[in-house]
Amino acid sequence: MNGTRGLSLLETIVALFILTTTVWSAGLLYVGLMRGAQTGEARRHALSTAETALQVWREKGKEPWPEDFGLEPIEGVYHDYVYRVEIGDPLRNPTFNASVPGSPEYLDVRVLSITLLYDEENRPKEIVLHGSLAK
Amino acid sequence: MRSKRAFALIYALLASVSFLAFFAAITYQVRGTLQTVRQSEDLVKARSIASLGNEVFFQLLKTQPADWVSSLPLTFSNEPGPDYFRGLPADAALRESLSYEKLGGYFKVELVDARTVSGMDLPPGGTYIISTCTAKVNDRQTTLNERSRLVLKLGNPYINNLAVSTGRVVLRDAAFLSGPIFVNKNEDGTDGHLDFVAHHPIGSVLNSGTTGAVKWTVSLDGEFQTQGDIRIVNNEPDGTSTVMHTFPVGSLAVGEEVTVPPTLEVRHPRGIGGVRAVGPVKFRPRRPFALQLNDSNDLFEQLESAQGTRVIDLDTLGSGVLSNGLMVEFEEDQVVIATVARRFQGRIYDLSLWLALLRLNDPLDTHSSGLLDTVNGDQVARGSFALKECRWDDPAYPNAPYPAELINDCRNLDVTGDGVGDFTGESLPVEGDFFDAYSLERGTVLQTIPLNRSDFTALKFETSKAEYVSFQPERPGEAPPPDLWAAPIFVRGTVKGKVSLAYELKGPPAEQAHWNRNTPLNRFCVLSDPGQSGVPGGVTLADQRVQLDPTEEDTLSEDMCLFITNGMVTGTGMPIRLYREICGTVLPSGEISATDFSQRRDVYAARLPQGSEMRDVVERALTDVFMEPVRFQAASMASDNGSGLTGIAFNGRLIGSSLDPDYPFMVNGISAQQMEWIDLQTLFPGSVYSPDHDQMLSEGYVIIPRLMREASSANHSYFLTEGAHGMVQDGRRTRRYANGEHRYDYRWRQLDADTLKQDLGLQVVPILIERRGL
């Protein structure tokens, strides 16, 4: 008879607990996956946009550089993202010789930094990319 | 009891598994998903940093003499270690700008010989290198397919390309062009376009207010890389330009001709722009590339330190050389350097006699003669002025009776062919203006230097004659007069071997650059007439098999000739200036040189309108007198060092047939001032015309009266000559090329970095040919 009796109360509670925990874990896992995917997608999209913005600005670098180019950060909206462009100080030519006519004082390249702002689960996030701005 | 313990154990185990799964899920949520994004982000960042590192490295390379070539492969990195900013100067500020703290990653550039890399499609010869940059961000490194690659050619842009321009290049009509041509950005930073200009002033016969067009064609067979577009442009009368056609990349196939329709109702005739591909044409518009040359001081410094360069200081050769110039003649397989001797040849008389003969005393009468049947009022005025120029009649010149034989020749001209002189009874002028004419000959031999075909022989001439420094202009832009210029170096002969000739005007750089901008004060003058010593005129190669096609085998001539100067390379011997006041002030001595035209065989076939009665008369008359026709075309190549930078002129075959030694052209000087071609055109339609002062004479035959021929020439500062193979370039301004065959001698491109640097003393700089990858 001992081997045929039903589950005791304790066994039932434990079984329910295990079942609940398992279902809860599965749900948590599913939600986590979904949130992770959404978060990753948002960041990936922002990353892609930042990379595109970087390329756009690299192309802009081939246009004439205004005298005040890069003195102040440039902010704008690109594909619904707010972004900030910072153009580093002119890279001084380490071989510059003022006594040699035509010797360039600066290299024809500057460090270009793109900071793109985006929301990740209603929290402000940013992506920063560094590239070159060459004439 | 045993079963209860087993129950507890199993359920505890299951509970543990459940908890583990629970925590695993949380961990996955927090880290797993973000890791994927982070890796992707790191890769993007790494790629950007790789591109940045490669760009900065390339810019640093450009600031350096190419000594690093011998130490390939070369690595350079911003990561502390053995490669940390190795091999190139990078000050603390630069290192800080490129530090890990600033960029958030490391980059590493590797420079290798491109010949060691498989899969590279490179032209034969030359030195090519590849700059490859990888980067690492948070241990995520760019892979082989994610590298930034720059293909660089080590060369000297001036001689490694047919044209290198930092601005728009304008190609006019009738040219045959072969590459490679580089068109970089304009000085204002905008894209430099390669334009075929459809406005065709040469040979224009349309009157104001009429309509019509003149068709022209440019034949292309070469390589063209621009940062702008390749276009056909029509110049408007108001000076603006209209783009008629833009070539898409690869749109022009072999044998194809692209023609744009004319725009009618014009005040000035326009052309129907045509571009014809006669061979593979590689159009590469908007292709990024960069180049940089230091100034002439660096170049000459390098040249002096190059192996075996012979430096010849004109200042030590005596006052005769400083005032009259130096003679450099290629004779057999050697160079003979001598003083310049002037040999009196005779007198040059004005053209009053011929004007009377051709009944051109009154320009208005020329309508009835058919000679000027297309002129309008303005042109008549100009024609009148030109006729006055021909008559000379200048009190500054002495007057003398015409030689009896000249008058007799004129009277006895048999135009009608009946065996009797047609002008016997004419009332012809009996006297006119004249000047003495001299030829330039070899004087005292100063040095004889052997040449060989295995290596370049580099000769560097220099002078510091500085009288021009004290010159005070009376009006803005006024240039020092010729007697303050540096001594000219006259060159002629047949080059057997490889030779480099350089001529440096030393002096305060500011003043020198200032004057050279408008009037190059030092110059090579290629003499187009033969010397008394038997050296032929012009500068030719003994073996003229130059490589004009990039696909040709490199088994051609071993002879090469390179001119380098911070002044000008020009020609003399062909006609010089139209205006009489220039004639006497060409050489520093204040005298000109010319052969006696009574000994000349120069003949001009008429290029007057077909069917013109006057054409027939003139042809027959002049042929009777001068025996045979001769091509009239520009005499030389020239390099304008307008920017004060290095002017480099080079050529595989310097001359065209205009310098054919069979024709003993007059020797004369060159003025830097420009002539008004319009006067010549008006008087002799179909010959020459250039409102822009930048056109060359048309190829073919033209009729130009004796004095006009002798005293007319273009300033060749901005263009090539016909038949020139190679290129002369400033590199800092708009280039205009017109009329003729401009083909590149590809042997120059095949010179490797060592030859360029060590044998020729030229700067060797990396030229960005192509970006690959990122």
Image: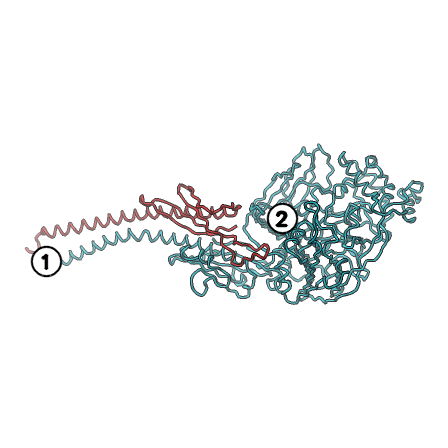
Chain colours: A red, B cyan
Task: Give the residue furthest to the left.
Answer: A1
In the image, residue B580 sits, relative to residue B487, either above or below, namely: above
Q: Residues within 10 Å of mark 1 (few under 14, many from 20)?
A: few
Nearest to N terminus: mark 2 or mark 1? 1
Residue B4 quadrant: bottom left
Q: CA distance from mark 2 to mark 1?
A: 98 Å
Tell me the subunit letter for badge 2: B
Kindly identify which numbered label has been placed on residue B733.
2
In the image, residue B472 sits, relative to residue B608, either above or below, namely: below
Quadrant containing the N terminus of chain B in the rendered view? bottom left
Q: Is residue A30 left or right of residue B525?
A: left
Which amino acid type corresponds to the residue marked 1 in the rendered image?
A: Lys
Helix, strand or loop for disc 1? helix
Q: Is residue A134 left or right of residue A118?
A: right
Q: Is residue B753 left or right of residue A61?
A: right
Q: Residues within 10 Å of mark 2 (few under 14, many from 20)?
A: some
Which amino acid type corresponds to the residue marked 2 in the rendered image?
A: Arg
Q: What residue sits right under mark 1 in the picture? A: B4
Q: Evaluate whether residue B609 shows in this view.
A: no
**Depth check, front residue: B642 or B585:** B585
Query: Do the residues at pointers 2 and 1 share their chain?
Result: yes
Q: Position of residue B16 (x, y in %)?
A: 19, 56
Residue B505 quadrant: bottom right
Q: Evaluate whether residue B578 shows in this view.
A: yes
Q: Position of residue B423 (x, y in %)?
A: 91, 42
